[in-house]
Image (cartoon, rainbow, N blue to C red):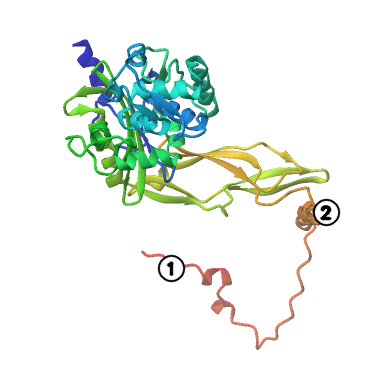
Amino acid sequence: MIFALFVSSFIIPASSFETTVETSTSDLFLVNLDTDTIVFSQKPDTNWYAGSLAELMTFLLSYEMIPDLNAATFTVDQTFISTLPYSDGCLDKFVGQTLTAKDLTAIMLLTSGNDAAYALADLSANNDRDAFVAAMNARVAALGMKSTAYVSPGFNNTSAQHTTCRDTYLLYQEVRKNDFFLSVMKSRSYTPAGLGEEYTVTAEASILNENSPYYFRYTNDAMYSYTEDTYEELVATTTYRGKTYLFVGLLGLHQSEQNVFADARKLTSWAYLNLSDHKMFNAEDALSDLTVTADWGDYQVGLHPYNSAFKTLPNEYDEAKLTYQFDIPKTVKTPFLAGQTLGRAKLFYAGEEIDDIALSSNTDEGLGMLSDFGRFTGYVYRRMTPHREILAKEFPTEPAVPVAQTSSEMPATDAAVPATEAVVPATEG
């Protein structure tokens, strides 16, 4: 009963946009990659086991550290497998075979293979696994993953190896920049060179498997992990009609009809049906002003976003729910360059942050004699103009004496209509 109460709390969505989709996975994150908009977020910064998702980092590093994936080789033997902290059997049928680093990489990606991950780590760091794990954690910091730590290159069922939805999103974006990763995922299967079809490996994530009830045809790629047949993790991207979403689900249930694959399919389908891209602003738009201090005085410049921005919002979104929050200094001293970040603006929809925008001037300031002279003369003009206006109010000019009209030109007094009354509309009743 305690477990049931625990799970029931997961189905309450916490999202930037309203949705009636019910989910069983605890921690969820859904991002439109085309507009970099978080459209669904539920406990995105809660720590959970990294599981086999650690192999995403192993892929990044081994691909960089091994000079030639086709030249580096690894002979699979039973002793290697039996001495691993955890073994998932992904290399069992290859015992006695010599595989290239390329083979091991494809096997690891398609099967979330723990054994292949350890083999790649050994090839990358000359069998120094501690050094490889240290490199993994160094890359964590470089990618800005604030809540992730690794203790092994593959699956590890301890809290010492943990991550979050948001960190997984950052890591997976980096992994998807690799063409080899994308090609392996697109093929869905791999056979090492020189070996027969009995050595072919296929994608094990159900969302990629056409024979699975959880197959989702629009999925591009996915990495999957499960813990003790109870909880599971998934990170995947889908593309439909030119729009790509990245889904992350941690602490999902491993049950029929209630699992992370079903949640991925339901949430992304909801997004495709109910959300669309809307243009928020252009690069030419001045979102705010900034006071600039030069040696001779102050003036103002407009602050612009770096690029035009599209954001993903409900199909019929309420413009009144869009708000900006600016973080701009009171004044900035010259000189500075066009494009230099001078402030930021956060864009909110219905109180949820959907963008963090860097703002800059579109002109260099304080760097050239001609521009400085133009600014200075404008400054002088602005300083002098208000002064003249005040004097004009204090010492009004006498009105011109009207020319005397002759009696023939003078209208009858009772027929005269004041000019001010001629433009007043008639009122009813």
Q: Residues within 10 Å of mark 2 (few under 14, many from 20)?
A: few
Q: Secondary structure at mark 2?
A: helix
Label 1 amino acid? Ala
Relative to 59, say whether 335 is above or below: below
Q: Marks 2 and 1, how far apart in space?
A: 60 Å
Identity, as a three-letter code, of the amino acid under mark 2:
Met
Horizontally, is 364 left or right of 310 in the view?
right
For residue 369, the mark is 2
Give the image location of residue 98, x and y in percent: 37, 27
In the rendered structure, find residue 426 and report the number of the disc placed on it: 1
Q: Nearer the viewer, mark 2 or mark 1?
A: 2
Query: Horizontal placement of 296 versus 71: left or right?
Result: right
Q: Secondary structure at mark 1?
A: loop
Up/down of 50 relative to 203, above or below:
above
Residue drawn where x is 57% and y is 41% of the image: 358
Mark 1 crowdedness (10 Å alpha carbons): few <14, some 14-19, many ≥20: few
Q: What label does residue 402 carry, if any? A: none
Q: Is residue 384 left or right of residue 138?
A: right
Residue 64 vertical position relative to residue 398 in the rendered view, above or below: above
